[in-house]
Amino acid sequence: MSVHHPTGQTLRLAAPELLAEALRQSRADTLVVAALYEQGPEVPLRAGLNPPRWELGHIGWFQEFWIARNPQRQLGPRADPQAPRLPALRGNADALYDSSQVPHARRWSLPLPDAAATRGDLSRQLEGTLALLSQTVPADDALYFYRLALFHEDMHHEAGLYMAQALGMEVIDPRWQPAALSQPRQPLCLEASIHRLGTAGPGFAFDNELPAHDQPLEAFEIDSRVLSWSEYLPFVEAGGYGQPRWWSEPGRRWLSERAPVAPRYLRRADKGWEHQLWGRWRPLDPALPACHLNAHEAQAWCAWAGRRLPTEAEWERATLTAGPAFAWGAVWEWTASAFAPYPGFCAHPYRDYSAPWFDGRPVLRGASFGTQPSMHHPHYRNFFTAERNDIFAGFRTCSR
């Protein structure tokens, strides 16, 4: 079976053999994206971007730091993050690639190894990881950091696609292309309930998904899928970007600072709307999911249409109970929930994953056309600041 088919549901429970194959295939995809940048333009110092060789080196460093160099890797989430590490394959790796210690702006001026040396580092690091994995017992704690390294690499793969789109680079792999929404947008009515929010049971979980806890929900109506461009663009064509009354206070500030007249990567042409995808302008298919929208734009459309964004608990309830009628995975979906710890939250060893970002930014749920299947999971909580429109994000709505 192709490792591109297992989703997060499977890989969070993966035994060593499947996990090893997933790590190999993830690395192959990482290197394909990295090759785009070796042939492309210089990446400018800009928020939301990173030097591609730094990204590549960081992926390998992260895997080695938490697995081969970690004497407590068998303890999984109970490991001490401050435990002394074994030496790195590259002597100055921590000074180059530790994202907790290397500020964003400094990454452009570091004495990074060249592309060939960086790829050599990644090859040796993966070989070491797979050798250790082959000797690891199939237990959740023992496999925790191997699974974490896989998901971390796949997050960076999608970030590489965000950068490629932002820089106008061509991506031709059919796996990373948006698809038209095939089903109508219909209301799904869910009854009042006590929803168990978060991850419970065996397998891997990110710390911000824990602990699972009961969340009372009133009855609600939610869209069966995200909005398409045919449903979003009437707001634009009605002058919505020039009418502050539809926008929240933070949204009005964003409008004032950026002065947008339409969503990012869209423009009007003589024959209708066009969008820029992977560096090329093309006629817009109105059935595509509305994408590259930030949280302000999602909230403004809802105000204009008399709708609202779902909470993350409503989103999770729907995906777990409505079955195939609740379609997700076309784009990341903004919710009305702030990224915050669940009651009883306890940070896992990778301390910088969640806790530093509990600052009120919105939660996004689901996945996108650029997301590796390993990251598709109904409990996964993504989180970006509200103004970000470089990510593959859209939204669905609920009745007020």
Image (cartoon, rainbow, N blue to C red):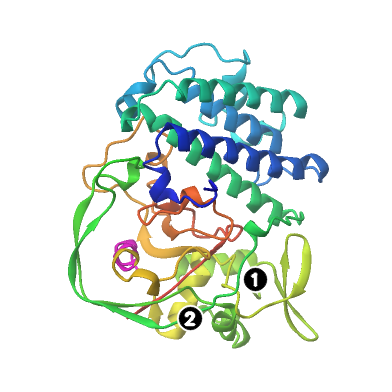
Would you name the residue on which mark 1 appears?
260
Instruction: Check the image and report above or below for 51 versus 93.
Output: below
**Badge 1 vs badge 2, beta-carbon distance below 8 Å:** no
Residue 245 image label: 2
The percent position of residue 173, horizontal first and vertical second, equals 70, 55
The percent position of residue 229, horizontal first and vertical second, equals 59, 78
Question: Left or right: 60 with respect to 79?
Answer: right
Q: Is residue 384 visible?
A: yes
Q: Dot 2 lies on which element?
A: helix
Tag 2: residue type? Answer: Arg
The percent position of residue 198, horizontal first and vertical second, equals 28, 52
Which one is nearer the viewer's eye here, 124 or 354? Answer: 124
Callout 2 environment at 10 Å: few (<14), some (14 to 19), or many (20+)? few
Tell me which residue sits at (68%, 46%) in the image.
46
Tag 1: residue type? Answer: Pro
| Mark pair 1, 2: CA separation | 16 Å
Looking at the magenta stretch, what is its main secondary structure? Answer: helix
- Chain part drawn in magenta: 310-318
Which one is nearer the viewer's eye here, 120 or 340? Answer: 120
Residue 327 image label: none
Instruction: Check the image and report above or below for 254 versus 48.
Output: below
Tell me which residue sits at (80%, 85%) in the image.
270
Callout 1 environment at 10 Å: few (<14), some (14 to 19), or many (20+)? few
Instruction: Check the image and report above or below for 188 versus 208.
Output: below
Tell me which residue sits at (23%, 49%) in the image.
212
